[in-house]
Image (tube, rainbow, N blue to C red):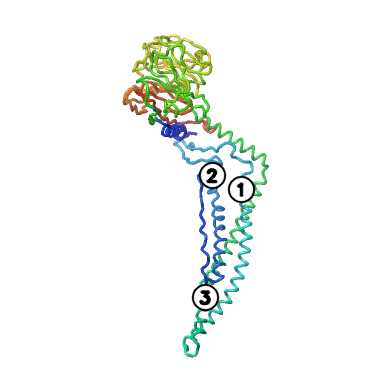
Amino acid sequence: MDVPPSSPGSHGFYQSLVDEVARAPRAETHVKIVVPVAEEAEEGNSVAAGRMWSLSVVLNPLLFLLLFGYCPSVTIRPKEGWQVYSSAQDADGRCICTVVAPEQNLCSRDAKGRQLRQLLEKVQNMSQSIEVLNLRTQRDFQYIMRMESQIKGLRSKFRQIESDRKTLVNKNFQELKGKMESLQPLIPVLEQYKTDAKLISLFKEEIRNLSGVLMGIQEEMGAYDYEELQQRVLNLENRLRNCMNKLTCGKLMKITGPLTVKTSGTRFGAWMTDPQASPKNNRVWYMDSYTNNKIVKEYKSIADFVAGVESRTYNLPFKWAGTNHVVYNGSLYYNKMQSNIVVRYSFETGRVVTQRALESAGFHNVYPYTWGGFSDIDLMADELGLWAVYATNQNAGNIVISQLNPDTLQILNTWNTEYSKRNAGESFMICGTLYITNSHLTGAKVYYAYSTKTSTYEYTDIPFHNQYFHMSMLDYNARDRALYGWNNGHQVLFNVTLFHIIKTEDDS
């Protein structure tokens, strides 16, 4: 099953960063249905006109009930269940879809049954109301029928009186005329009652049909054991959650941005967050310059970083080389100055936990990126763990990729590529694939990709906007699904779009 390109960063961390940066100090959607209240009957209106208003008040809720009864999807919110909001097929006939998962613990084992029972109770209550209304309507209808004959008689008598006004006293004439005027509005009311009587009959029939359908659904649901239904729902949720967990890895398709978070420091430096930290832990670490420095500044959040509010300062025991450091699971990993030694420094204890040399790795501008800056050894992290990217004489100065044990810094596995380290602008790892840019200057793009899973490479063409014309640090953060960059003294963020391919049982 192929899943279309997704960019969680654009809807999650990246967008929240945009909002948070905008808010930082520099250096229940509700649906409301309004039911109009009828004006009180004017003085002189008949009793029947007031009853017609009562009928409309009773019928309005019925219309809402029928609307929601025939369109149940109107009442179901997307977060109450797994939703497929787009689907198609590719050339091979495989399903392409996007699944929106519900929030955790929203599924109640008998929520649907309770919903049906509540709806059925509303229908039954409305049926009783309609029955009462029908009796009242029939009574009023008989009353109006009698009044209709009286009106016709009065009309005939009134015409006779008008033809011989001289035989009557003016007072009696005005009295009769007033009665006629008060009875005149009952004629259209009579016609309305005839129409409403037919409408009520139709409503009663529709309610009977709807009640039958709901009873059938309720009986069908009752045929299943609720414990069994609950287990089936939980199994489905687990399967879908496992499927979605596989979406953490994918192939790079596009880079958008950048978002300029801050302008500070020299032309060269590094800033980062911990991809292994909890979602509530958004500490930022800041390391200015590429040499002769060992001061690391810490900020509690992006907002504090933008405002320049430091929470702590660390004085490392060794100076660093380059700008290709990484924070991973609470420790800082960096290249010790004028050596090929990788140092692991714990922020919690404030001391070096371990250090180990990368055998044969060039250092001190022997095999840097194109911009220099002692960028020989590039440490990075992705969804699969901790990595070191460097070059050796044995591999003719081409890039070597090594996966490291985060605790001991021992090399777990190594891959030799055919891409010259000196010709690379910058590089970063996503899902075990190394992506290399062709330059650190304007017009740069991701030009080459090496997969450690298949030990193969391919040439790519993924441009990105090098807004400030000199990139000296570019690293991927798997938690934020974003690229952190140091662009000529500007700390920037790029959003990435990944394409996910998931193998299902049908594909095997």
Q: Residue drawn at (53%, 82%), measured in percent from left and top?
A: 154
> Is 255 rendered above or below residue 56?
above
Residue 86, percent across and down?
Answer: 47, 41
* Labels 3, 2: front one: 3
Distance between mark 3 and mark 2 Cα atoms: 52 Å
Residue contact between numbered discs 1 and 2, judged by CB atoms under 8 Å: no
Distance between mark 1 and mark 2 Cα atoms: 13 Å
Say which quarter of the image contains residue 4.
top left
* Labels 1, 3: front one: 3
> Is 33 rendered above or below residue 145?
above
- Reading the image, the residue beneath label 3 is 182
The kind of secondary structure element at disc 1 is: helix
The kind of secondary structure element at disc 3 is: helix
**Amino acid type, callout 1:** Gln
Say which of 75 and 355 sits in front. Answer: 355
Residue density around tag 1, few if under 14, some if 14–19, many if 20 or more, within 10 Å: few
- Reading the image, the residue beneath label 1 is 115
**Amino acid type, callout 2:** Arg
Name the N-terminal-most of marks 1 and 2: 2
Distance between mark 1 and mark 3 Cα atoms: 49 Å
On screen, residue 398 versus residue 283, left or right, reads: left
Residue density around tag 3, few if under 14, some if 14–19, many if 20 or more, within 10 Å: few
Name the N-terminal-most of marks 3 and 2: 2
Residue 385, percent across and down?
Answer: 50, 21
- Reading the image, the residue beneath label 2 is 77
Residue 380, percent across and down?
Answer: 45, 20
> Is 182 rendered above or below residue 210?
below
